[in-house]
Amino acid sequence: MLYEHVIRPALFCLDAERAHGLTMSMMSAAQALGFGRLFMKSIPEDPVEVMGLKFPNRLGLAAGLDKNGEAVDAFGALGFGFIETGTVTPSAQPGNPKPRLFRLVSEQSIINRMGFNNHGAENLVKNVTGRRYKGILGINIGRNNTTPLEKAGDDYAACLRTVYDSADYVTVNVSCPNTPGLVKLQDAGSLKPLLTKILTERDTLAAEKGRKVPVAVKISPDLQKDALLAAADVIAECGADAVIATNTTTSRDSVSGNPLSSENGGLSGAALRDKSTEAIRILNGHLQKKIPIIGVGGVFSGADAKEKIEAGASLVEIFSSLIYRGPGVVKKILRELK
Ligand SMILES: Cc1cc2nc3c(=O)[nH]c(=O)nc-3n(C[C@H](O)[C@H](O)[C@H](O)COP(=O)(O)O)c2cc1C
């Protein structure tokens, strides 16, 4: 109520990225003041084991909101069973020129072309070290804009090494439409050598450190069915531990009436819901539980989360609903899921 009638109207008066910056500052301040700790015991317990990890519950924060891992305790205090930080790249980078974030309010959707703005993998490790959050921490990694596509594997391997000790799981992001060429890495011919390199590095680190960190691969909803199935085969055969479906879409079919639909970037929120659920359904039919699926895209309610789970997801993540519905949406979805 407070969020929908007071806080959201105030935030939505601001440019989308300023509102996002303000929200992140408030979350970081809440964390610094120790408010997160007060609610820490309130992570609702509905445990589930996925990728060999015990998740307190099935609902997580999707990548891109806490890109630098600055407010894990504060987001954790909202009740999330897991939090995916990042995307981080080996070196810090500013991302694309502003404006690069747009709200399509009547469609409860967002278009972004942030372009992996982040402070670098080492900075994220500093931020999350010493966290009090007791849920699962994912770290999502990507390639720097300036790294040629054929050297992408070096960036992912470097990030993996940097974040390895801090992560419960790591996500390989090959599906962001805002980093030139990135989505081409999903073509089976590129994906196989890339994942082989990353997972060989993971196995080396696991042997060195005596702890195997699961690796998930996040894919785009824009892959045609054949390409999606080919990517799924490569992901499973290379030994990745999960697939995350999906990232944002470049399609504008579901928002074509909105003047902001002509903005370049990835679309998320309610307008992505059916497309991401369909990708999960296709993956589930094909993978036959070989590896788990983490579902994301347009989840605003327990019913939406259930739909993703019925389509084949073992875990569910949210981003846009937190912007439109506020922090209370986390516990609401969890209550409705039980
Ligand atoms: C502003 C913004 C930034 C995002 N940044 C990232 C990112 O850095 N890495 C990533 O894997 N996904 C990123 N995403 C995609 C989300 O993680 C998620 O896959 C997508 O928004 C669909 O979920 P939703 O409909 O609940 O928002 C971003 C999404 C938004 C709206």
Image (cartoon, rainbow, N blue to C red):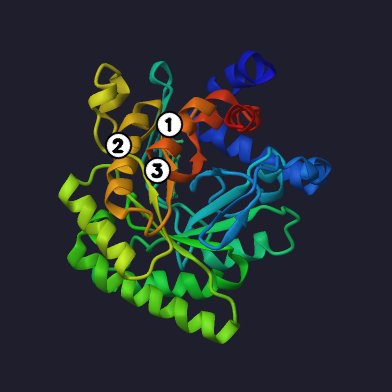
Please tell me which residue is depicted at 16% across the width and 50% down the height of the picture: 226
User: With respect to residue 44, does 86 lie above or below?
Assistant: below
* Residue highlighted by disc 2: 278
Q: Position of residue 269 (x, y in %)?
A: 42, 30
Distance, label 2 to label 1, CA atoms, is: 10 Å
Which label sits on residue 312?
3
Q: Nearer the viewer, residue 33 or 43?
A: 43
Tell me the crowding category of disc 3: few under 14, some 14 to 19, or many 20 or more residues within 10 angstroms, Cα based.
many
Task: Identify the secondary structure beneath mark 2.
Answer: helix
Q: In the image, is 127 to the left or to the right of 285? A: right
* Residue highlighted by disc 1: 307
Q: Which quadrant of the view contains residue 267?
A: top left
Q: Looking at the image, is mark 3 or mark 2 earlier in the sequence? A: 2
User: With respect to residue 199, does 225 lie above or below?
Assistant: above
User: Would the CB of label 1 be found within 8 Å of ligand 1?
Assistant: no
Q: Amino acid at mark 1?
A: Glu
Q: Which quadrant contains ligand 1?
A: top left
Q: Nearer the viewer, residue 7 or 253?
A: 253
